[in-house]
Structures are given as C-alpha cells and as structure tokens.
Image: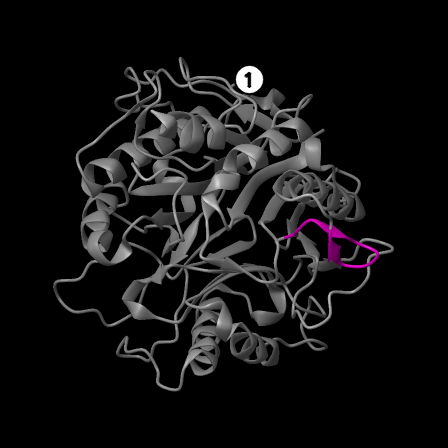
Amino acid sequence: MRYVFLSVLAVMALSLCGCGSSSDNGGDSPAPAPPGPAPKDCGNRCVIEGTGWPAIKSASFGIKTHKMVYAGGMASFNMKTSKFVPGGIKAETTRALKNIAVIVEAGGSSMDKITSCSVWMANITRDFTDMNAAYVGFFPKDPPSRTAIQPGKLVDGDSLLDIQCSASAQNADRSVVPFAGKLPPHMVIPLSAASMSSNIVYASGVQGRDENMKIVSGGIANETTQALKSLEATLTKAGSDPGHVVSCTVYISDMKKFADMNAAYKAFWPMKDGALGGFPSRICSQAAEIAGGANVEITCIAVSNKKGVAAPKIITPPGWKPLTGYPLSIATSAEGLVFASGLQGWNTTSMTLVPGGIGPETTQTLKNMDEVFKAAGADLATGAVSCEVSLVDFADFDAMNTAYSAFWAKQAAPGRVAFVVAGLSGTAKVEIKCTGVLSADAAGGQDEIII
C-alpha cells in the first residue's frame, strides 16, 4: 500500500540507536515503560526508536531533548508489520495515539506528560465527534492543548487522520489551564486551553468565538481579533502575555481572505512594549475545513513572563532582504529553543522563488532554514527536533521527499509531519516550519541543553 511509505515510513522514521526503545506488543499496543528520564547520554538531541519498527531516512519517529520528547506525525499503522489498521476514525485515532505512546515512553516520558497535540483530519465535519470520543480515553485528566484541522489532503487518501504530539520529560513540571468554553451537553472537547512545562506555554487553537462559543459576526478580520483576545486571556491565566509569544500557526478558510486576516493579526501584537519586541514567528496556510465553520484558527507558543525567565529574542539572518507585508519574525528563540517561521524556497537576497519546481524549492527552503538556525546559534542538521512540511500538490510529494531526505543524508532527521494544504501565501509549492535546540553557548548555559 502506497500509504505505508508516504505517511508513516517516509513521513516518520529514521530508527537509529538513541535514547531508548519500547518493547511494544507487536506494535498493537504500548507496553508500560518505567517512570523516569531516558538514559542520560542523550545529549543535545537524540533519536527515539521503536523496537522492531522500520528504519528509513526522511524523518525520525521522535526526538528527545533534556526536557522534552517530540513525536513525529503518526497515523493508523501497526508499525511492526507496516500495515494500515482499518476500522474508521475511532480505530484510527486509537491506533495513532498508541503509536505515539510507544514513542513517548521510549523517550522516558508518559502520556500524562503530553503538552500539546495537532490532529490533521481527512473529514473534520464528519469525524470530529467520533475522533474526540476515542481521543478522550487517552487523556482522562488535564488533557494537553490541541489543534484539529482538515488540511487540503493527507498524504494518502486511505488515512483519516495524522496526529503529532510533544511531551515534557518525566521529571519536568507540567500544568494546564482548563478549557472554559460553554459547550452543548452532548459535545466533548478533550483539550486544555493551554499546557505549561519548563517555562513554555502551549496554547490550544483559538477561533473567533464569544463566551457562548458562537462565531463572532463580521468576517475573518473580526474573527482574528476575537481569537487573539481569547489567546490573550488564556496566556494571562498561564502566566504569560502576548509580548512573550514566540510562535504561531494560522489556518484560514480561504487565501483570498489573507489580507484581511493579516491586517487584524498585525494590529494585535505589542511591537515595542512586548518582551519580544516584535512579531512572533509564524506559518499560515489555507485549510480545507476548520472545525465549526470558522474562518480562522490560531495556535501559539509563548514563554512565561515570571521573574527570572529570560525574555525571548528575534532572530534575523544576516543579509536577508526583509519580508515586507508579513507580520512575522523569521525566527525567535527562547528557553534553549529556536522557533522558525514557515520558510519557502526563496533566494534570500531578492525574496523571489528559485526556479525548477518542487525539488529545488525544497532544497533551497532547507538551506534557508539552516541559515536561520545558524543565526540563532543552532544547526539544522543536528539540532532540529520537529518539522512540518506543507505542500500544495500531492503529486509533488515524492520529489519533495527525495530532496528533503538528501539534506539529512548524514544525520538523523527530525520528527516530521507532511500534508497537502488548500493554499499557501504566494506561488510556492512547499513551505517548511522547524523547531530546534540551540547549542549550549547560544542557550546561555540553560540546563535543558546538554552537549
């Protein structure tokens, strides 16, 4: 089945010896892992493997740092047999989360330490309720933050969803801001408004809804403003504020509405008074469907504003022509991490796309990402922990994957999720967003970085 190689093997795993392994039950269910951190020789970044799982070159099942475990995108596969597990959305949700449990436990953490998840669904209108019914069983108390979106297409039509999660290490702190929305009695939304760990706040996706969970009138600009007000309220409860936001993901219903969203988005951020002193990093794409018929959904990561926590920084690679008209920073850094915006295959002195199509665009995008990481004090090849690849045409997947895999020919690739979106800004065929760890010197000696 083509999906085996595209959505899981190609999207997920380079199974190298790394932090540890999981003795999963034939891939059918995760075996309990003893509590406690992964082996201490993990270093700055190491690869998580699943015992008996396949090994390929385009991505890792997961990456472990000192305080976090980053699981790559997972779908409904028995990973030991590489066979798709059918049965509908509930069965697929269960299988994907069992796979994530294997990764998280192999990294020395556990499902109750999950901080955030992203769920990409093939049909969110039809499957959202049943997905939640299966999802909630894995998080009976203090669920992680979450975003659920229907992109343009998953990388194979056989799958109904992909799920990607991150978790705090077993010995790291974790707390949540409970979801406070007024939902109908029959509706279950198993998420927290935000989850916090190691001075980082992971906020759930917010839409432009009022206190009664009704979408505000006036179109995407008003929805954007309301969504960001809701985000601010959550950040306040979490011990942060908009000036400490380092990264956002924005999904909109139609790229024709991009300018209106952008204007409202730009007006929200405290450019001069905020700790960051500018815009967060950002990626924006068009979703095929946003839950509840909303025009926009925004997910952000912030740093705590409590005393003693270093302020986040804006990263600007030297020599790059400014991206005018886009309210974002090319990258930010905080708490030993770099958060890059979604990048495209630009010639960075002219900010025009390189010619040649998807292969050259992918290669140039990763070169650009490497420049961003180096400007932050990191290295993409050895420091990236998680990447997200957005394509506009499913037919481009193989060529993208060939170019993407070549970049990590000598190093372990990060965890990854890839999907087709309904649209990107501009005419690019691919956009890539990555998060990584800084070197110890660039991180200022913070204790989560071990070399």
In the displayed structure, 239 sits above or below 437; it is: below
Amino acid carrying label 1: it is Leu
Seen in the picture, residue 418 relative to 280 is either above or below; the reply is: above
Give the overall secondary structure of the magenta segment. Answer: loop
Horizontal side of residue 187 vs 413, given as left or right: left
Nearer the observer, 158 or 308: 158
Secondary structure of the residue carrying tag 1 is: loop
Q: Return the x and y of residue 351 as percentages of the image width and height.
A: 76, 59
Q: Quadrant of residue 303?
A: bottom right
Residue 339 at x, y = what percent? 63, 51
User: Can residue 69 be spotted in the picture?
Assistant: no
Q: Position of residue 437 (x, y in %)?
A: 66, 40
Specify start and end residues of the magenta stretch as a single range. Answer: 343-353
Q: Which residue has dot 1 on it?
A: 16
* Quadrant where the image shows the C terminus: top right
**What is the quadrant of the N terminus in the image?**
top left
**Viewer can see residue 144:** yes
Q: Is residue 409 above or below residue 207?
A: above
Question: As displayed, is residue 27 above or below residue 210?
Answer: above
Q: Nearer the viewer, residue 127 or 306?
A: 127
Q: Residue at x 39, y 75 (%)?
A: 208
Name the residue located 42 percent from the left edge and 20 percent from the top edge: 50
Residue 180: x and y in percent read 30, 68
| Residue in view at x 52 percent, y 48 percent | 390
